[in-house]
Image (cartoon, rainbow, N blue to C red):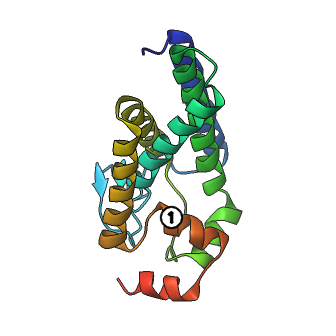
Amino acid sequence: MGISRKYWLITLGVFIAATAILIAMDRPPICTCGFVKLWEGEVNSPGNSQHIADWYSFSHVIHGFIFFALAGWLFRARPVAQRMGWGLILASLLELAWEIAENSPAVIDRYRAATMAVGYSGDSILNSLSDGGMMMLGYFVAARLPWKVTLALAILFELFTLYMIRDNLTLNVLMLVAPNDAIKAWQGAL
């Protein structure tokens, strides 16, 4: 089930292109605090979405689960190695396109207005690329595990982050699409 070099090189190209776009958007390369942490555990801090991993990394792993399933459906007629390769490219394109959109002024303002991320200023480039890496981790975990185990992991991650920070992928999407004042108040009470 190995992915050929061609697909890896195209995926690398997607990451390089996304990095160039984020640089052109004037995103900070690392946390403006001036240092890099492996884990940022404070959600409502200036370091959130600035370092290598944070509570939202779990959501990006789930993106990988979802993108693996999508690739399996879209590329089902292709041999496994091609399905995996094209799926990885598609997953990287989708994930990094979101990272670019998420760091646009319009989406940053939307997060501030509609979610508990009142002081959100966008991601550092390091964090955006790490989010892409977390998605890839999820993609390859889903490739190796039975779908029921992957689904159970996704539910576990959602419940864990809901318990720990009153937020998760489901609430994040809900609050961006259809903000709810009661949910926002509940999230802010942490």
The structure residue drawn at horizontal position 66% and vertical position 52%, both measured from the top left corner, is 101
Compared across the picture, whether 96 is left or right of 129 comes to right
Q: Is residue 131 above or below residue 137?
A: below
Compared across the picture, whether 105 is left or right of 188 comes to right
Q: Name the residue furthest top.
A: 5
Q: Name the residue furthest right.
A: 106
The reply to whether residue 16 is visible in this rendering is: no
Amino acid of disc 1: Thr
Q: Is residue 106 above or below residue 73?
A: below
The reply to whether residue 160 is visible in this rendering is: yes
The quarter in which the N terminus is drawn is top left
Q: Residues within 10 Å of mark 1 (few under 14, many from 20)?
A: few
Residue 132 lies, in percent from the top left, at 49, 40
Mark 1 = which residue?
170
Q: Is residue 7 above or below residue 189?
A: above
The structure residue drawn at horizontal position 40% and vertical position 48%, both measured from the top left corner, is 151
Residue 44 lies, in percent from the top left, at 40, 73
The structure residue drawn at horizontal position 62% and vertical position 69%, both measured from the top left corner, is 176
The structure residue drawn at horizontal position 62% and vertical position 78%, both measured from the top left corner, is 179
Q: How many marks?
A: 1
Residue 29 lies, in percent from the top left, at 49, 45
Please, what secondary structure does the residue beneath circle 1 have? helix
Q: Is residue 43 above or below residue 50?
A: below
Judging depth in this view, the residue of 32 and 109 nearest the camera is 109
Residue 92 lies, in percent from the top left, at 56, 34
